[in-house]
Image (cartoon, rainbow, N blue to C red):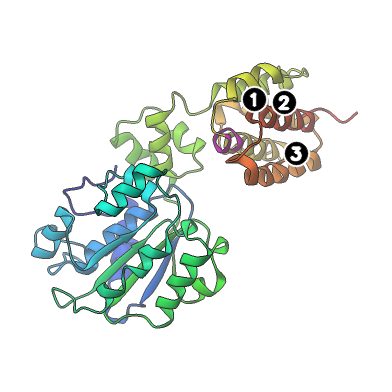
Amino acid sequence: MTDSPHSVPSFLPWQEDVARAWLGRRERFAHAWLIHGLAGTGKRQFALAAGASLLCEQPRRGLACGQCTACQWLASGNHPDFRRIRPDAVALEEGAEQEDADAAAASAKKAPSKEIRVDQLRALGPWFNTATHRGGWRVAVVYPAHALNMISANALLKVLEEPPEHTVFLIVADAPDRLLPTLVSRCRRLPLAVPARADGAEWLAAQGVAHADQWLAASGGAPVLALRRAQSESQPCPSWLEEFLAPLAAGQGPDIGQLADQLEKTPAPDWLDGLQRLFVDLMLAGAGAPTRYFPELAPQAQAVAARAVPGRLAQTCHWLTGQRAYANHPLNAKLLVHSVLQRAALACRAAS
């Protein structure tokens, strides 16, 4: 899906028209852009491809040519006017090598940081104070923006308050409302829409994904997320969700203990996400609308929704959102699974 380390980043098919229209105004470009939208739709790919297009010396219809000197430098990973600011953990996931001996030594002593550190931003000072090597733009891509902690966010804000000349910041975020408001106010916003369902399914099929429609539905219409899930999971709808819902559809209670045993070692954000999506489907079914995420469970969802109290389903869905705050650091993983599933099952019962 993503470009290899030795190629120029390119836009995904559903991004090209938006990119051309946006890049066509580059002479009046803002110094910082907040690129935001639903997670898993390719915002990071868009930002990296945009950086390549801004640096390209012979753009074709506004996009990077892939052939000029600037594109060759970028493809080799050593363009002097391009920087990625990302957590160490993300860099390692992307296959990047440690940038210097100090970073390598630090990573040997502790886990790679999941935050963007303030020293990563301070290290850009000398870069800002030198002329661009090709007389064009200097591009910094910051992602994901929610990895900025309060200190690094304020350091970035300070840079944007007095932006360096000929420099464009491309900041990638899922949810701007989770960022420092003063930081958001210093950026022009570029929202990226979810691609049409047909376009996303066609692209997934081209990547070799079977049952593309189901994977896309389970991922909320986000093709990049659907591809990641298809590559790491066995089926679009987790089997444990069917085991949870089927007894409830028959007017019985699910075996919470057995489900807790299954999910104990599954990362809490993953199973919580699946349960949240299921409750959205239950509320849709209760309103007589088609299910969104798990169409294969539609009959069971309709049976449960017909018995359940709509307000209780909505309250539990909202409560599940709050449980995400504890998801990464549960005191007792099995107890968390058990208590959450128990409450979810009670919300699906008929009113007494």
Camera sees residue 12: no
Q: Is residue 145 visible?
A: yes
Give the CA distance from mark 1 to mark 3: 17 Å
N-terminal-most mark, 3 or 2 = 2
Q: Tell which circle, 1 or 3, labels the residue nearer the N-terminal end.
A: 1
Callout 2 touching callout 1 (CB < 8 Å) = yes
Give the magenta part as a residue range: 268-272
Q: Residue drawn at (21%, 78%), measured in percent from left and top?
A: 130
Is residue 271 one of those drawn in magenta? yes
Quadrant of the image occupied by residue 189: bottom left
Number of residue marks: 3
Prevailing secondary structure of the magenta residues = helix
Q: Secondary structure at mark 3?
A: helix
Give the numbered dot on residue 299.
1
Left or right: 96, with 303 as reference point = left
> Crowdedness of circle 3 by 10 Å Cα count: few (<14), some, many (20+)?
many
The N terminus sits in image quarter: top left
Q: Which mark is residue 303?
A: 2
Indicate the quadrant containing the C terminus: top left, top right, bottom left or bottom right.
top right
Q: Can you say whether 203 is above or below 81 in the image? A: above
